[in-house]
Image: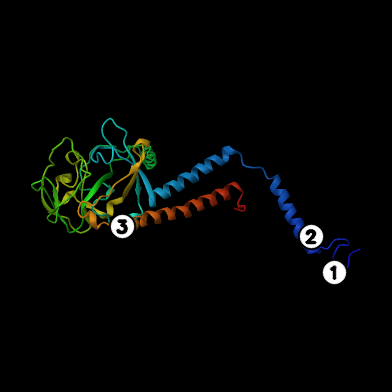
Amino acid sequence: MSDDDGAVPGDGRGAEELDVSDREAAKAEKKKKKPKRPFWVELPILIAIALVLTVIIQSFIARVFVIPSESMEQTLHGCAGCTGDRVLVDRVVYYFRDPEPGDVVVFERPDTWDQTGLGEENPNPVFAWFQDLAAQFGLATPSEEDVVKRVIAGPGQTVVCCDAQNRVSVDGKPLDEPYRHHLYPGDRQEGFPRITVPPGKLFVMGDNRNNSRDSRSQGGGGENGFVPIDDVIGKARAIILPPSRWQGVGDHDPQAAALSAPAWQTGIPAGVGLAAAWPTLWLGRRARGLLTRGGKTGPR
C-alpha cells in the first residue's frame, strides 16, 4: 500500500523521480541496442567532411600551389628537370593590407597577359574540376591561370631599368635585390623604359630576371603588364614540399628594407589566420560527432 504522498514503502524516491529514472534507463538500453554504423559507411562521410573543410580553408585561409616554371629561381624551384616546389600561400594577410614591394605573390593571370600553354586546363569540364581540386592539394599541375612573381612597385610609383650598375630603380632610387638569380657571374638584366604604376595595379617581376616574362613584357609590356591588386590571391609564406626545400619565402623589401614593419607586426595577419582555423576545425569535429553518434554529441 502506498503512502499519501505517492512514495513507495521502503524507497525514499517519489513516483515522478522513479519515472524519470526509468525513462533514462530505457534510453540507455535503447542506445546500447542501436547498431553502430559499419566503417565502410562512415569512411566516405568522413572523407567528404575532410574535403569540404579543406576546400573552405584553402579558399579563405591558406592554399597550396605548385611552382610550374623557373621564373622565380632560386627563391622557388620550378626548373626543368627538378621537382617543382609546393608553396603555402597565405590568403588572410591581404584582408588587412595591400601587397607591398618585396612580397612574393600568387595572382590570377590578368586578361592582358599572354597565354603560355603551361598547365593547360582539360577541355572536359569534369576532368577540369578534378584537376583544379587536385591542384589545391598540390597534387597536380594547376592551370596557367595562376602566376607567382615578386612585387617590385605599387600604385603611383615610377619604375625603370637600368642605372649604371644595371639596377632597377623606383622613384629614382636603385633597388636592393639580394634575391635576384644570376645565370652566370656578371650577367646583366634587360632594360625597360620608365613607366608609372596606375592606381589599383602592381608592377611585378620574377627573381630569375633573365628568364621571366612579367610586367616588363606581358601583353607587349606597358599598361598591359600591370597586375590588378584585386587579382592577387595571397602571399607565398613557405615551401612545404619537397622536404629538402622546407623553408620560408623571403619578403625582403627592395625599396626600403630598414623601414619594414617589425616582425611581430608582420606576423599579426598570419596569427589571425591560424586563430580562424580553429573554429573551422571545431565545427568539423562537431559535424563528425553528429554523423557518427546519430545526432548526439558526448562530453569532451
Circle number at residue 18: 2
Looking at the image, is 67 positioned above or below residue 269? above
Side of 97 relative to 11 (left or right): left
Q: CA distance from mark 3 to mark 1?
A: 75 Å
Q: In the image, residue 120 lies at what x, y percent?
A: 29, 37
Residue on which the image places disc 1: 5
Query: Helix, strand or loop at disc 1?
Result: loop
Side of 42 relative to 53 (left or right): right
* Lower position in the chain sequence, tag 3 or tag 1: 1
Residue at image point 21% right, 40% down: 181
**Quarter of the image with the N terminus in it:** bottom right
The amino acid on which the numbered mark 3 sits, given as a three-letter code, is: Pro
* Of residues 129 and 77, the one drawn nearer to the viewer in this rendering: 77
Q: In the image, residue 279 lies at what x, y percent?
A: 48, 55
* Of residues 146 and 115, the one drawn nearer to the viewer in this rendering: 146
Q: CA distance from mark 2 to mark 3?
A: 66 Å
Side of 61 relative to 160 (left or right): right
Residue at image point 61% right, 39% down: 38
Badge 3: few (under 14), some or many (20 or more) residues near its Cα, within 10 Å?
few
Residue on which the image places disc 3: 262
Residue at image point 31% right, 50% down: 233
Q: In the image, residue 226 lies at what x, y percent?
A: 19, 51
| Residue 176 seen in the figure | yes
Q: In the image, residue 196 lies at what x, y percent?
A: 14, 55
* Of residues 130 and 233, the one drawn nearer to the viewer in this rendering: 233
The amino acid on which the numbered mark 1 sits, given as a three-letter code, is: Asp
Looking at the rendered image, the disc whose residue lies closer to the viewer, 2 or 3, is 3
* Lower position in the chain sequence, tag 1 or tag 2: 1
* Lower position in the chain sequence, tag 2 or tag 3: 2
- Among all residues in the image, which is located at the extreme front? 258
Query: Helix, strand or loop at disc 2?
Result: helix
